[in-house]
């Protein structure tokens, strides 16, 4: 199981329930990395998807504590354990896609984190854990510096240390 995130210079990932920094190259990268696999998202992140709908061509596992919640095109999990059981063993092609609460709860199960690092510092109220400060993580691929719409970014890969 891996995680995919777009994080700003201070590991900020969103404000007021939405993603503040959006670059088209990141959307393409997200599609490339997650392929036709399974994504795990929290209910708040689902609400921020286009039309509040699960993403097409992927299995969507949605986390909520609401026992009555149902959504077409997605399977619902009511706990981390339930989501892990739905993800399968081993959890091949499974990607944790946010938001903050879901990243924090599932990071211990992830082997890699695909980070689109965008070098800007917008206001943020949701963050990804700072992987540079966590001893169990190392930067496996620093990525090449690119630019989109005046924003500098890199596609980085962090790996759990062996
Ligand atoms: N930059 C990026 O790559 C990226 C990616 C994704 C999200 N984001 C941002 O992250 C922010 C949202 O993060 P968030 O932490 O507020 O919300 P979230 O993690 O997307 O969703 C939180 C909700 O998930 C459900 N949930 C979480 N843990 C659960 C558990 N253990 N068992 C059952 N249900 C559980 C609960 O839903 P109920 O309330 O229904 O019970 C909870 O309110 C937004 O700003 C979004 O734009 C950024």
Image: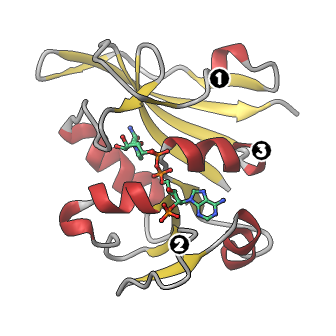
Above or below, 21 relative to 49 = above
Element class at badge 3: helix
Residue lying at 46% horizontally and 14% vertically, measured from the top left = 10
User: 119 left or right of 106?
Assistant: left
Between the C-alphas of marks 3 and 1, the distance is 12 Å
Element class at badge 1: helix
User: 94 left or right of 37?
Assistant: right
Query: Crowding near pointer 3: few (<14 within 10 Å), some, many (20+)?
Result: few
Query: Crowding near pointer 1: few (<14 within 10 Å), some, many (20+)?
Result: some
Quick one: label 3 or label 2, which is nearer the N terminus? 2
**Residue 8, quarter of the rendered image:** top left
**Residue annotated with mark 3:** 108
Element class at badge 2: strand
* Residue 28 screen position, x and y as percent: 28, 49
User: 20 left or right of 2?
Assistant: left
Q: Residue furthest left?
A: 149
**Residue 89, quarter of the rendered image:** bottom right
Q: Quadrant of the C terminus?
A: top right
Quick one: label 1 or label 2, which is nearer the N terminus? 2
Between the C-alphas of marks 1 and 2, the distance is 25 Å
Residue lying at 76% horizontally and 51% vertically, measured from the top left = 109
**Residue annotated with mark 2:** 61
* Residue 42 screen position, x and y as percent: 49, 59
Residue lying at 53% horizontally and 68% vertically, measured from the top left = 64
- Front position in the image: 144 or 20: 20
Tell me whether circle 1 and circle 2 mark residues in contact (CB < 8 Å). no
- Front position in the image: 141 or 54: 54
Q: Residue furthest right?
A: 162
Between the C-alphas of marks 3 and 2, the distance is 18 Å
Residue 131: assigned label: 1
**Residue 117, quarter of the rendered image:** top left
């Amino acid at each position: 199981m891996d995680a995919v995130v777009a994080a700003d210079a201070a590991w900020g990932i969103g404000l007021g329930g939405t993603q503040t920094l959006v670059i088209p190259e990141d959307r393409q990268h997200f599609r490339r990395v997650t392929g036709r696999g399974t994504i795990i998202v929290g209910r708040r992140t689902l609400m921020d998807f286009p039309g509040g709908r699960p993403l097409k061509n992927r299995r969507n596992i949605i986390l909520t504590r609401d026992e009555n919640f149902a959504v077409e095109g997605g399977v619902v999990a009511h706990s981390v354990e339930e989501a892990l059981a739905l993800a399968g063993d081993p959890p091949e092609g499974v990607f944790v896609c946010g938001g903050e609460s879901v990243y924090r709860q599932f990071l211990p199960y992830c082997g890699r984190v695909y980070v689109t690092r965008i070098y800007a510092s917008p206001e943020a109220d949701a963050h990804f854990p700072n992987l540079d400060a966590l001893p169990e993580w190392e930067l496996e691929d620093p990525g090449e510096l690119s630019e989109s719409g005046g924003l500098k970014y890199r596609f980085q890969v962090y790996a759990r240390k062996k």
